[in-house]
Image: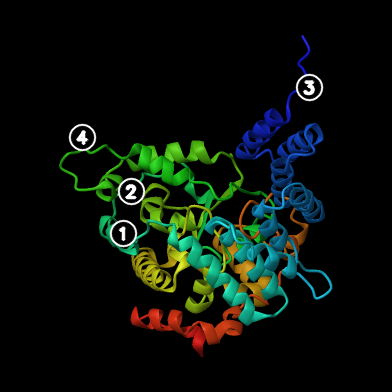
Amino acid sequence: MQCGAGSADAYDALARVATVLGAHERANALYRQAVAHEPRVARHWYNLAVSERSIGNLAQSHSACEQAIALDGRDYRAYLLRAELQVQTAASHHVEQLRRELARANLTDQDRVLLGYALGKELDDLERYDEAFAAFALAASARRRHLAYDVRGDERKLRRIAEAFPRGTDRAARGLIDSSRFVFIFGLPRSGTTLLERILTGLAGVRSNGETDHFARTLLTAAPSPQAAPGIADVFARAASVDWDQIAADYARRAGGDREVVIEKQPLNYLYLGAIHRALPQARLVLVSRPPVDICFAMYRTLFGAAYQFSYAFADLARYYAAYARLIEHWRAAFGASIHEVRYDDLVSDPARVGAAAAAACGLLWRDSAIAIERNATACLTQSAAQVRRPIYASSRGHWRHYRAHLGPLIQALRAQKIDLCDLD
């Protein structure tokens, strides 16, 4: 029996499934089938553009964005994606088009968010920093208005995590699996975790699962329910009471692989470091850090999905950063030399030396060719998907200084949290 040709929506749905399964080339072919079947539907072109970017076809992604915009001039997702694909130049940019769209009378806040971040990115590329900040501020404030977020909840959560996994606890898995082949790269978003991942996956015998929630799902699935453990106070304490050998075995099944080294590059794994160390005591833990003002502003000028809701207001950013810094200091005190720290500024300044040190900490054989990240053909789905298709560059280091005239409130908020602002020197 021969199946029919199928519909564009069917190809689109199959492509989404293929993406979830990590079959990115297959997903790309399916998205291409969708636009071939219905070439007048803007969302099919936008989905294709996202797919092309993930596998490094930046020119094709740009063309697909233009097709989406031509079919639906109000599909502002395509404007933002197009802005992120390349560095704009005086001879080639879309600033005036973006300004015209922002001047429309009937825009929603969601429209302002997408257009504002797109305009800010393009103006930043053109070194028109005062105008860029105005665009970022417009977009961030529009995004923040629609979030039911209270940073106090995150402050309590990070404090409880440290309490649930105190220093000196020796109860851990018995080592029934080889946990030394698992590498957890973590740190705040925009800190350089993707860059380090791309370098390490350029080495032999290394595979990355990308930004998965494998460990978090394993841990939270195994944690007893309130009904099963009525004497345990909250979810954090219940998570600390699990069978660590079971967690190790279940995580290994989720992570996959056999003899190869497996990287989990999920920034939020800093929340689970205590549990990771108990379940996988030989796992390699790699923290990527960036100076406070630099990382906070890098997050502020980025539109994330549902995560990182603290990143759209300076006051929230400063308080979350302080809570994060306290948690990281707790992990440093608890695990000491088990955590290998990579400083972003050092990584982009001397990638061969810093990359080699990270590789050694992960038990990997180094080769200098790994720093040619633009030759790494594996898919990338993070905010850095277009940036990692370029050779390593250092222009993002200290980028906040171009905006110093506008960042007084952020600096004051960080100082109020007693943060050592090492990047002000």
Can the viewer see residue 342? no
Amino acid type of disc 2? Ala
Please name the residue that numbered disc 1 is placed on. Answer: 153
Amino acid type of disc 4? Gln
Residue 347 image position (x, y, % from top left) = 62, 72
Residue 315 image position (x, y, % from top left) = 39, 73
Category of crowding for the residue at label 1, using alpha-carbon neighbours closer than 10 angstroms: few (below 14), some (14–19), many (at least 20): few
Lower position in the chain sequence, tag 3 or tag 4: 3
| Outermost residue toward the front in this view | 105
Query: CB of mark 3 within 8 Å of CB of mark 4?
Result: no
Tag 3, which secondary structure? loop
Q: Quadrant of residue 198?
A: bottom right
Query: CB of mark 4 within 8 Å of CB of mark 1?
Result: no
Please name the residue that numbered disc 3 is placed on. Answer: 5
CA gap, disc 4 and disc 1: 24 Å
Instruction: Report the front residue among 392 and 312.
Output: 312
Q: Quadrant of residue 335?
A: bottom left
Instruction: Report the front residue among 83 and 295.
Output: 83
Category of crowding for the residue at label 3, using alpha-carbon neighbours closer than 10 angstroms: few (below 14), some (14–19), many (at least 20): few
Please name the residue that numbered disc 2 is placed on. Answer: 172
| Labels 2, 4: front one | 4
Tag 2, which secondary structure? loop
Amino acid type of disc 3? Ala
